[in-house]
Image (tube, rainbow, N blue to C red):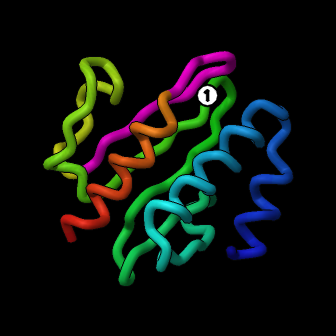
Amino acid sequence: MNPDVTSFISQIKQEWQINTCNRLREIVQQAIPDVTERIQYGKPHFLQNGQYAAVIGPAKEWVSFTIFNAQSLEAPEGFFEAGSPPERKTIKIRRDQVIDYELLAKLIHQAAQSR
């Protein structure tokens, strides 16, 4: 785990966003055991073999989470934001929103395996 990513997450202002980011980070680590973390473009990025696997982006009202290499992923209607390019799937997580983290972990793993 990269200490810069740990520091980034710990400096987020809203507790629910810190918890969400930590949970997302945890599932990426579990889904892609050889993942590399770094801060790039001001956000935590997760790389697999030097290629983007996922990115976390906290904003004022939500935390966005993007999975790369996602063209073959299938999720329930409305799970991901509409309009994303096929190779990227983004979910915006808002306060008190119920997220199926188990499904998200499965999708991350699936995207990582299809590289």
Q: Is residue 91 shown above or below 27?
A: above
**Where residue 77 appears, x then y in whole percent?**
25, 18
Residue sitting at x 40%, y 37%: 103
**Where residue 63 appears, x then y in whole percent?**
60, 35
Q: Is residue 100 shown above or below 115?
A: above
**Where residue 93 appears, x then y in whole percent?**
55, 28
Q: Is residue 32 shown above or below 110?
A: below
Q: Residue 111 occupies which quadrant of the picture?
A: bottom left
Q: Which quadrant is the N terminus positioned in? A: bottom right
Characterize the local packing of mark 1: few (<14), some (14-19) or many (20 or more) Cα atoms within 10 angstroms.
some
Identify residue for label 1: 62
Q: Which quadrant is the C terminus positioned in? A: bottom left
Which residue of the protein is positioned furthest toward the bottom in this rendering?
Answer: 49
Q: Is residue 5 shown above or below 83?
A: below
User: Which range of residues does the magenta coloring cover?
Assistant: 88-99
- Nearer the observer, 99 or 85: 99
Q: Amino acid at mark 1?
A: Trp
Residue sitting at x 69%, y 75%: 2
Residue sitting at x 69%, y 28%: 60
Mark 1: secondary structure: strand
